[in-house]
Amino acid sequence: MAQSLLKAEHIKISFGNVHALTDVSLEIQPGEIHCLAGENGCGKSTLIKIISGVYQRDGGTIEFDGKQLDKITPIDSINLGIQVIYQDFSLFPNLTVAENLALNTEVASKKQLVSWKNVRKIAEEAVSRIHFDVDLDRKVESLTVAQKQMVAISRALMFNARLIIMDEPTTALTKKEVDALFQIILQLKQQGIAILFISHKLNEVFEISERFTIFRNGELVATGNTKELDDKKFTFYMTGREFADSKFTPKKLSDAPVMELKDLTLNGSFEQVSFSLRGGEILGITGLLDSGRTELALSMFGIRPADSGQIIRGGKPVRIGNPRDAIENRIGLVPEDRLSEGLFLQRSIGDNIIISEIDRLTKGKGIYDLEKRDREIERWVKELEIKTGNPDNPVTTLSGGNQQRIVLAKWLACNLDVLILNGPTVGVDIGSKHDIHTILQKLANEGLGVIIISDDLPEVIGNCSRVLVIKSGRIVAEYSSEEVDEKKIIDAMM
Amino acid sequence: MDKKVKRLLHSNEPYIFLIILVFGIAVQIKSGQFFTGNNIVDLLSALIVPGLFAIGEFLALIAGGIDVSFPALASLAAYATTKLLLDMDYEGNVVAAFAIAILIGAVFGAVNGFFIGYLNLNAMIVTLGTSSIFQGIMQGTLRAQQLSAIPPGMKNFGTTAFIVAQNRQSGITSVLPYTFLILGAVFLIIAFMLRYTIFGRGIYALGGNPISAHAAGFHVKRTKFLMYIIIGVIASMSGICRVCMMQQMHPTNMLGMEMNIIAGVVLGGVALTGGAGTMIGCMLGTFLIVMVQNSMILLGIPTTWSNVFVGLVIVAGVAISAYQSNRSAKQAGRHAKEAA
Amino acid sequence: MKKKVLAGLLSAGMVLSLLAGCAAAPGGAAPAPAAAEAEAPAGDDTAEAPATGGAGSIDDALKAAADAQWEIAVVPKDSTNPWFVRMKAGVDEIVEDTGVNAYQVDTGTIDATHQAQQVEDLIAQGVDAICVVPVDIESMDTVLKKAKDAGIVVVTHEGADLKNVDYDIEAFSNEGYGAFIMDNLAEAMGEEGLYTTMVASLTNGSHNEWADAGVAHQKEKYPNMTLLEENPRVESDDNGDVAYNVAKELIKTYPDLKGIMGTSSFDAPGVARAIEELGLKDKFFTSGTGMPADNAELLKSGTVKSLTLWDPAIAGKAMVAFAAKLLAGQEISEPLDLGQEGYDAMTLRDGSSTVFEGEGWVVIDADNVDSFGF
């Protein structure tokens, strides 16, 4: 094998008493696509920050291009040809694409004046390397996430990059956009640039990478060729646990539907959506990013009330004009972006749990009953196995999986009949994802009607007793859990 | 070309301009006095001081900060300068006044800049504090009183006509003093600075994403520091212009202007969150407020209601520009989708 | 008018200060009559007063005060402010003329707490009378209660709302002063033509009373003058620049307008600047409250014919004389004569038993403008 591009061995770092990395190694060959995986908090980001010179390691060796590196500063790292594309892309939303691309070069040139001609030239050169077709005069804030990512990649390429590190680059992308990104990554590979691709999505790891490395709790657990990896091993390496493959089968279906939709329409988003949901079943709704699936969730919960059609609860049509109506009708929604929509991030875990039932925690006459509150909080923390030392801590102290449990707890505290979840495990690591699925199945078995809206097909297939596919605002297919498979769904979706 | 037109329609300025035009026509219909030389000159002359302040505020807002200390800074710099020249019995021209005031303004601007830039404190809190300090120095240390006579050089500068408009029927003459050229010059210099210097682009970059600005190699702290010095300089020049035009120095009558200046700048499409906005928009927004304030009588709005009316125009203006930017954001989203 | 629209957005914290003393005095003076406690006529508690009681003349009272060397202290708002420097001159003058034991305290800058402290000190020293121009009505009232309890005579000026005083004297009634401004404007306008009125704000108590009184006086006495009905009152925000811009707008809108009656000390000077710029000297007129030194040039150039004011020196003398009269145990009745110009036939304000109003206004014109020293 040729000489490695990057060889980091036995890297250690601790912050105070916390050993963030106890012993990790990572080796990347020139021009290879390498995937680094691991659950949240496993030390992926810490290692990247060491490689890019943000943190200094406490022990271990790093070689780049065969040269030993003692201390790495951010500038060193850039000069070596290491570029990191973080999830926020580090772009200037208020400036044009051209300026975003050229600014670093212009500043570095130590000139005092800006030559707009030069800016354009630099920018054109930059986008041409990945054949990225974009209006250079557009402001970055008006671009899609995928386009912003392209800008960030173009910018990274300007520094004679030899290794581009992408930190979870697919999180906010649609399927199509992910494919486009993978094309670019392959192009870069052809130009001899190595890519370190950070992800915990197994299908992506299989699709794009040649080799992989997996960390867990600050230690290296596995590295090798992706070909030798399979689902089970991947999950095991990531979590240290083995999960049995199981499809969900409803145990206690109610006779009458708990909720029915009749020709529900929201102009411009979805049309004439009809289905019925029975207590005890988990209904999956899947579709592409702009298929109307999110709007459907919002309409059922009254955030964007439907223009026509009916929502029927217990045999009677009900009007759901706002979230209050929905809650009164015992319908709950776990939103897509739990961080901005589902949680009060600065407030305590406890407050977040009881917020939707706060009306009931009174001694009467609107006086807050603190004892009742504490009992409720305690109950849900236990029930959902939320890992926290103290429910008075702010929600931000929890991991993604635990935050999602808080959102669930918040709704379960309201004694719902119908719970709608939009992308329930986006950004949640595999272990927590599995736990959340277990909770949902348990809830369904207790008689709750659950709707999972998701484009994570294994999630939909593994958990739902029925799957509806929505395309351009219309339900185009329905499968029972026996007949469903990924291929059928994808064919219907596209 | 088509792209350019589209972009223009997505920006705020044409709409503010339209509001100004509609308002002007309304005043014209009601009084027949809007599109007259006199009135235009009056409005431009009333724009000078707020306009200069607005440019300073614009800089602060673009960089993601804010400045509420400029009226106090301007009063202090102008007072100290005028008082000094009076005590010296200075007979020369206005250049000395500007030079001294700029020096004072730079020093006090540097105080703001030091706290906001180097110590990274919240700009609103810092400038609220320095505003009190500047007033304290003026009233406590300098024991400021109204100065009813000002040095002859300043007086000449403030009253000599750059443009005179005469109404043929009534014979009244409105004067646009040379101070207007100061506004023009500052506008052009700052516009050039923001567009064509690395420092100026740094101010925009800072307002867009301070962390990335640092990563891109800008000296974030130094940029902020220098910028607040520039704001101090502009404010002090504005103070001198005011004294020259009023032909007297009143230490408190500029205080309290900050709210309307900020309103005008925001009206012009400058984001309070930083990074977004243009000089033209900033000037149009400020002009709109000056115009509304100085047209209440022409419009025949009873004095009792004029505050309500000015407030309504501000709220309506801000609402329109917010609606507009919302709409263009949505459109941009749609274009983006199509492109994807 | 501009400030208020948005002022609420940021708290009043930054609109910290009004300039001390003189600038604020004309504008802030004399609020609506207070329902002052009906109090027994003073003199009762000046037990040590000699037997000069009864309805004696002011000269007798001053003589008695000089003989007894009763200590009369005058506490101004801000002794460094030219307005109160002028008041001190008045106090010194009456001391020189009559030999009474009176003096003005050196208060330093305007500060309500500091002023209250100084009054407390005077109480402790056991002075016989305290004359105060209060900075803050409420805090001063509590301190003055102690003074009264200690048997000290209390006379105030520009403190009509104070309760714990023997008497408060005001230079004039709002009606009288408004009429006086109108007389000056009418004279400048040749008693004919269209005019309007300007106040700091429509909510300012005294300004609007002056303006109302001015208009009433015009209707009664100057039939050839007419009030601009479409816009009978405009605001200057206590700001010369606003007054200037508003005047320009008025002149543009109403070509027939010939005069503006000002009330705040910024009104007439601001209007005058518009008159100068527009070339309307001798065609457009204004009058109103104004400080002599600030407006000397305008008066001398003839842009403004006359301004109106009251003289703090005389007010100072009147306070001292009133204190002497009370100490001497003389009977207080209307019309009250304090032996000072404009303060020689004072009457009680309607509904009040403690506030005496005089006719202590003065005209400032090109001839006397330099004689005031402030």
Image (tube, rainbow, N blue to C red):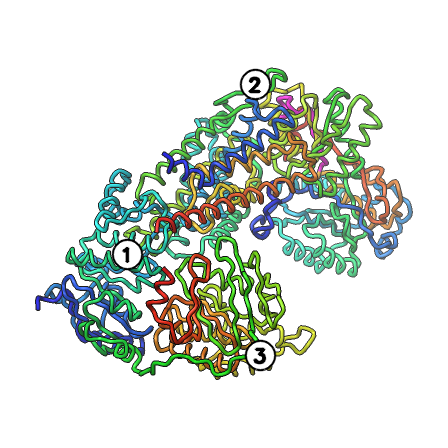
Any magenta on residue C298? yes
Residue at label 3?
Answer: A373
Snapshot quadrant of residue C233: top right
- The chain letter for the residue carrying disc 2 is B
Tell me the number on the disc at residue B166.
2
Front disc: 3 or 1? 1
Q: CA distance from mark 3 to mark 1?
A: 50 Å
Q: Which one is nearer the viewer's eye here, A469 or B255?
A: A469
The quarter of the picture where the C terminus of chain C appears is top right
**What amino acid does circle 3 point to?**
Arg
Front disc: 1 or 2? 1
- The chain letter for the residue carrying disc 3 is A
- Against B258, residue C370 (above or below) is above
Tell me the number on the disc at residue C270.
none
- The chain letter for the residue carrying disc 1 is A
Residue at label 1?
Answer: A180
Answer with mark 3 or mark 1, whichever residue precedes in sequence: 1
Read off the magenta span.
C297-311
The quarter of the picture where the N terminus of chain C appears is top right
Front disc: 3 or 2? 3
Residue A15 seen:
no
Q: Residue C172's spot in the image, x, y percent?
A: 78, 38
Q: Which one is nearer the viewer's eye here, A488 or A214?
A: A488
Q: Residue B187's spot in the image, x, y percent?
A: 42, 35
